[in-house]
Image (cartoon, rainbow, N blue to C red):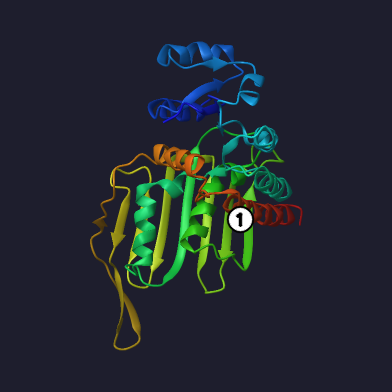
Amino acid sequence: MKKNIALIGAGPWGKNHLRNLAELGVLHSVLEKSEDRIKKLKESFPEVNFILDEGLILNNPEIQAVVIAVPSILHFALTRKYLLAGKDVMVEKPLSLTVSEGQELIELADRQKKILMVGHILQYHPAIIKFKSMILNDELGNIRYIYSNRLNIGKLRSEENVLWSFAPHDISLILMLMDYEDPLRISAYGGAYINPNIFDTTLTIFEFKNGVKAHIFVSWLHPYKEQKLVVVGSKKMALFDDLSEGKLFVYPHEIKLENGKIPVAHKADFITVDFPPQQPLKEELLHFIDCVETRVTPKTDGIEGLRVLKILEKAEYSLRKKSTG
């Protein structure tokens, strides 16, 4: 593989991109504004070319693509800048902080004939890919209900609320599981306890045309970490627990009518589902590399990222409307 990808930002999440891009042999340079951070990273990655001058990436024809891993408030401006410079771009979620900005980036990438990909990493998780195949193969039956919890006592943000920080992954997954059907209704509820202008916890409820309902509960004011996605089907129920060792489980519980009218739950032991052992971030980056080389549209392209933004904006509107009465 060619060393033709630059990394923009090597912070808490960016350093994971750094490690994987270096291992894959495609990392040309890393742009990082913190000299202290560069000094620390140099100890683990002495062979990596760290730079402070953005122009050395923007104006370097050897660099074909960039991965942007910076605070989300910078996503729009940097993605726009690098697309205009003729680079393919993978930007971490969310694509931007408004639908109008996201639409502008999609149109710009199209005009420039450049790849635009959004870092919805869970779509590249082998357990989620297996989850989707189970649904397509009708192993769970008709989907009745979906819910996800993404909870932590974590890093509180000042540039975006917990909905925009935590929920994009889950929105992306639920839309994917629903074959990208737009929900008919979206309602969101939340609380802002630390900063009166920034929601710390939110519950977003979706209703789809086929009767499926879903909810996403996110919070960074929670006593423990939890990352779970549950699908309740007419045949079986399934759980993706990203923090557990097995990660993917099926529960073949049955509901039977006794005496012809009384529903009774018959519980069954869960089954751990096997899936390939690939690392999600590496798989995501391999997909981006393949798209750069073959010019294939990414699975999580700008249009997929825009779908998520539209949901976020509607949920945000619902939150604000309820909080102001």
Residue 14 spot, x, y in % from top left: 51, 28
- Which residue in the protein does label 1 denote? 307
* Residue at the image position 36 percent from the left and 42 percent from the top: 243
* Residue at the image position 44 percent from the left and 43 percent from the top: 287
Q: Is 160 rendered above or below residue 315?
A: above
Q: Nearer the viewer, residue 244 or 103?
A: 103
The N terminus sits in image quarter: top left
Residue 68 spot, x, y in % from top left: 57, 33
* Residue at the image position 51 percent from the left and 45 percent from the top: 120
Side of 242 where 204 appears, left or right: right
Residue 60 spot, x, y in % from top left: 61, 23
Residue 221 spot, x, y in % from top left: 54, 40
Side of 233 where 207 appears, left or right: right
Q: Is 233 rendered above or below residue 97?
A: below
Q: Nearer the viewer, residue 66 or 281?
A: 66
Q: Amino acid at mark 1?
A: Arg
* SS assignment at label 1: helix
Q: Residue furthest bottom?
A: 260
Q: Nearer the viewer, residue 32 or 246?
A: 32
**Quarter of the figure with residue 207:** bottom right
Q: Nearer the viewer, residue 110 or 244?
A: 110
Q: Is 160 rendered above or below residue 299?
A: above
Side of 130 where 58 appears, left or right: right
* Residue at the image position 27 percent from the left and 54 percent from the top: 273
Side of 230 where 159 appears, left or right: right
Does residue 68 appear anywhere in the picture? no
The C terminus sits in image quarter: bottom right
Dot 1 alpha-carbon crowd within 10 angstroms: few under 14, some 14 to 19, many 20 or more: some
